[in-house]
Image (tube, rainbow, N blue to C red):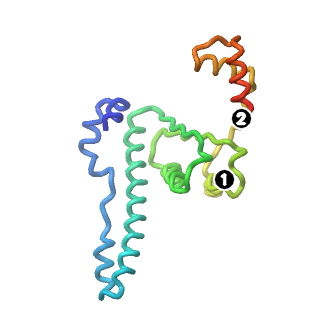
Amino acid sequence: AEQLRRVLPGCEELLGTRRSSLFCPTSQADVALSRSFSGSTLESAKRRVSLTLAGRESIAQMHYAVRRLLKIVCSHFKGVVLFIDDLQWSDTATLDLLKSIVLDGEIPSLLIVGAYREDEVPDHHPLAFHIRELEQMNVTITKIRIGNLSVDYAIPLVAEALGMDDDDSKVKSLAETIHRKT
């Protein structure tokens, strides 16, 4: 909440009335399960089904809450860019959340920019699967390929990060090592 206050001044008034609406209401899964199953022999099956439904419900609630929060934030700005780096390391749950956000047509003025290392995302990678799936749903995805930095461009970055001079031999040596390994 404190970070949100810094990013979105006045959010207390905004979220104060909507806080309960950020989360969808809980379902009646346990009630339905208790009516569907009877007897102690099915108690373990009931618990497994209940946990599965509760897990799916929790995920749906979290997706809803994130989308709702984005709707609130995006409605107060002329444009919001959500930049996510290193998507090649994303798990399926994170990619499912992103897909949920992308497919929500009610989030105004949101641009999602994702970056990933193409050489780390083969065709069978979850990210590649999600991208293909979104493209099949006619979601516009613009791909921009950016090559690696040359050593000459890495040297000033390393020098600046270390607070050293570009001409220092240690900076050049470190930049060359970083370039070679990344």
Residue 181 got which mark? Answer: 2
For disc 1, the neighbor class at 10 Å (few under 14, some 14 to 19, many from 20) is some
Q: Residue 28 falls in which quadrant of the image?
A: bottom left
Q: Which residue is mark 1?
A: 128
Q: Please name the residue shown 59% across and 45% down the image.
A: 87
Q: Against 48, is 181 above or below?
A: above
Secondary structure beneath label 2: helix
Q: Please name the residue shown 66% across and 17% down the image.
A: 156
Q: Residue 178 falls in which quadrant of the image?
A: top right
- Which x, y percent locates residue 158? 64, 21
Q: Residue 46 falls in which quadrant of the image?
A: bottom left
View extreme (front): residue: 170
- Which x, y percent locates residue 40? 30, 86
Mark found first going from the N terminus, 2 or 1: 1
Q: Against 77, is 52 above or below?
A: below
For disc 2, the neighbor class at 10 Å (few under 14, some 14 to 19, many from 20) is few
Q: Please name the residue shown 71% across and 35% down the image.
A: 181
- Which x, y percent locates residue 157? 64, 21
Q: Quarter of the image containing the N terminus?
A: top left
What type is the residue that disc 1 sits on?
Ala
- Which x, y percent locates residue 70? 42, 43
Secondary structure beneath label 1: helix
What type is the residue that disc 2 sits on?
Lys
Residue 119 got which mark? Answer: none
- Could you tell me if the residues under marks 2 and 1 are in contact, i.e. CB atoms within 8 Å? no
In the foreground, 6 or 171: 171
User: Residue 1 vs residue 60: left or right?
Assistant: left
